[in-house]
Amino acid sequence: MAWLRARPRLALLLLAALLIALPFLVGAGLGRSWVRVLDFVLIYALLAIGLNIVVGYAGLLDLGYIAFYALGAYLYAWLASPHFGLHLPFWAVLPLGAALAGLFGVLLGAPTLRLRGDYLAIVTLGFGEIIRIFMNNLNAPFNLTNGPQGMNLIDPVSVGGLAFEGQRQFLGLTVTGLHLYYYLFLAFTLLAIGVAMRLQDSRIGRAWAALREDEVAAAAMGINTRNVKLLAFAMGAMFGGLAGGLFAAFQGFISPESFNLWESILVLCMIVLGGMGNIPGVILGAVLLTVIPEALRYLGDLQRATLGHVAVDPSDLRMLLFGLSLVAMMLWRPAGLWPSRQRKREFASEDEHADLYDARA
Amino acid sequence: MPTSTMPAPECLLSVEGVCKRFGGLAALEDVTLSVNEGEIFGLIGPNGAGKTTLFNCMTGLYSVTSGAVRLAGEAVQNRKPHEVVKRGFARTFQNIRLFANMTALENVMVGRHVRSHATVIGAILRCRRTREEETAIRARAHELMEYVGLGHKVRALAGHLAYGEQRRLEIARALATNPKLLALDEPVAGMNPAERQQMADLFRRLREDGRTLLLIEHDVKLVMGLCDRVAVLDYGRKIAEGAPAEVRKDPAVIAAYLGGAT
Amino acid sequence: MDIFTQQLINGLVVGSVYALVALGYTMVYGILELINFAHGEVTMIGAMVALMVIGALLGVAPDMPGLMVFAGGLLVAVPACMALGFAIEKIAYRPLRHAPRLAPLITAIGVSIVLQNLAMLIWGRQYISFPPLLPQGRHEFLGAHVTDTQIIIFVTALIVMAGLWLLVERTRLGRAMRATAQSREVAQLMGVNVDRVIAATFIIGSGLAALAGVLVSAYYGLAHYYMGFMLGLKAFSAAVLGGIGNIAGAMLGGLLLGVIEALGAGYIGDLTGGFLGSHYQDVFAFFVLILVLVLRPSGLLGERVANRA
């Protein structure tokens, strides 16, 4: 490791090579279904990076984040499927989805952001449910969402006449739609990482951090706390909307069930588990929480092999484990598995120095 | 410092008949005072006299019930805190409120927020103007850290600094907003005599460099030795205003501090 | 039949249950300034435990009078949930009392998920029907129907709320709770055992939640591992409507929200020209919540809480 660290260029090159080869390595080693898992890892990474701006940077707890994902996905389905007979190209629809989600973020945030953080949590939680209720019921009087059945036959992404479906041979490798989506998602994820990191290390990122630390002091330093919060909220929502559009194109099918509360919680778990505020940690969280449930499926196979039947459905265990891990992380490792230096200090110093402030106040 | 030999001083901050009520309780009644450009103005008074309340009314943390606060002629009462800062009124807090988990330098850099302009797009694209602005912010923050004597502590976490250093850092952070008026809420509370002396030196240096200071203090001795003019609050009313030597002799002030009747 | 009166009555009955749950939110918030996300799940656990006991009782003594079986279920469910509330506070919240604000909120969500999924593992994914144990008689009243079940639920809720009111206003514990809500530090200095007061608050709130859970599933004749989520969200909205931290406010807010929801569901079709139907009933609580937060964040009876950082 030290040898690599001394050669950052080479390390970067190796990483790039690994990322390019990854779907083929995974496909060859574990089977094609794992390439699909890989694609989902990237979608969730995108979501987690977006939510991290809201929760990790600005310290606002958003529990309805998946609603923005849903908005992006539904907009994609409306504009690129037989539902309304519209077939706009993905590069036109994705920005629209992000913008729509961002707009909703502002609309939802504006009335609540001047209140305490926990109100925001509950309002966003409600908002997530409301969006789902509307998606479930807006098949009448005119059919907007096709109700609980969801919408299908959504156009796949297609770049210069190359549709991301089927399979073709290229340099002796079988390249499927799954592989192409992988590269597309990878590009968006890298872009998101760049955007998030640059924002964090800017005047705006500092304002978010100040806000998270002490809202009154931030205002007294000339920060317009309302606008800065709204900005974080809208930025996060836009990432959500973008990811939603990608998801719709990738799946070809969406239904309200994909956007329930648990998805919001899942993304939150990713950033809490990985390390709030720290991009590498957040990505680690996305990888772990996407891969672990897949791996848990083998637990079902194991039960079938040993007991002859499935006693405990592993997918039922999944959320239980996530819930336990949320509690356990907060109690014992609040900064996450891979914390940013700052967060680590924050959680560690809270107790040591509390008395100091109290005594002097 | 005798002001009579100087040209008529420019009035920077004027508080005009400010009243503040919390429910039925009058915390400030008809307070009027003015701070001149380039002076150190002291606001003193016994505990609970309404000093911090007045401070919060001036800096936008509280709305005023009636009256006006003007900074360089512009009304700032009932404005949001960040708008007051933008108009050139920076403050520190009685019970230090730093961003404890950011480094000392980052704290000061946050103070530059209101004097910088990079937008989201600028920050994402990191265009030349953003980079130059960022460099300027950093340079200014370093400069201010040096100014308050914390040049060696730029990388320390604000929360890990010693108490006196935290006070200085708060001042540097406030200075970073380019204030016309710097208001300090009990900046030497809890300090030993040597530290107090150092702070007094810092305040004099600020005045020499043309800053205007508004000082809320408990420590009458420090205020009398340092301030050009002083106002005394008692039970939410101003009972005296003037040069320290005059105020010190004022019977109402003596009564307020000794707790006797006038 | 008079739809207005009917919906008003239905709303008051459901609202009295919201009020019971809202009390738990408001008491905990008053003292700890924490939204106890797991509170809704406690109502669900209450209903599930009661159903288990009721099933067992009916198995052993099928001839037992319905009301006694019902009381038996309550007698186990309420203490069980009190113990659960105590455990939640002790394990999940107490260690984080001085942690950054986000930490206990996240733990609360974690606890909520754990309870919900444990319930799913134990009692299954399907709806469980609640046997008709309460008297089912129907009465004509001002052109509407009132059932005995409705009367029992409403009266029980009112009696319990009156009891709580007396507890808070007249007893030593109540005084300690009010003092702690004013200022934890000062109460501590005055010799109040703050830890014990907080534990008591969770225990009382969870007991009320259990009662509410049993009543609501008896009313609808159903219980489900997911029922706590919506009930919790609505009760929280009710607490905000009344003014969070305010006990009378929670009671008022609960009743009011129940009525708003019932009338809203009854008239939404007319109001929107048939565009939206009564399956949007669950949306009302949320809109009430947003409206209150925008127009009067302190709620109907509360003090200002906005920006109290």
Image: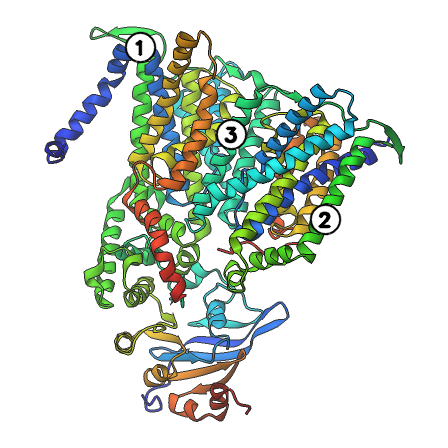
Q: Chain of mark 3?
A: A
Q: Characterize the local packing of mark 3: few (<14), some (14-19) or many (20 or more) Cα atoms within 10 angstroms.
A: some
Work out whether residue A195 or residue A44 is closer to the camera in this orientation and state it. Answer: A44
Mark 1 element type: loop
**Which of the two discs, 1 and 2, sits closer to the camera?**
2
Q: Characterize the local packing of mark 1: few (<14), some (14-19) or many (20 or more) Cα atoms within 10 angstroms.
A: few
Question: Label 2 belongs to which residue?
Answer: C163
Tell me: B139 left or right of B12.
left
Q: Chain of mark 2?
A: C
User: What's the residue at 50%, 31% (across, down)?
Assistant: C113
Relative image position of residue B135 (x, y in whole percent): 22, 52
Mark 3 element type: helix
CA gap, disc 1 to disc 2?
64 Å
Mark 3 touches mark 2? (CB < 8 Å): no
Q: Classify residue B145 by image quadrant.
A: bottom left
Q: Characterize the local packing of mark 2: few (<14), some (14-19) or many (20 or more) Cα atoms within 10 angstroms.
A: few
Q: Answer yes or no: are tags 1 and 3 on the same subunit.
A: yes
Q: Is residue A15 above or below residue B52?
A: above
Question: Label 1 belongs to which residue?
Answer: A31
Q: Answer yes or no: are tags 3 and 2 on the same subunit.
A: no
User: What's the residue at 72%, 40% (across, down)?
Assistant: C16
Work out whether residue C228 or residue C172 is closer to the camera in this orientation and state it. Answer: C172
Relative image position of residue A346 (x, y in whole percent): 34, 49
Picture quarter with the N terminus of chain A: top left
Question: Label 3 belongs to which residue?
Answer: A261
Nearer-N-terminus badge (1/3): 1
Work out whether residue C138 or residue C198 is closer to the camera in this orientation and state it. Answer: C198
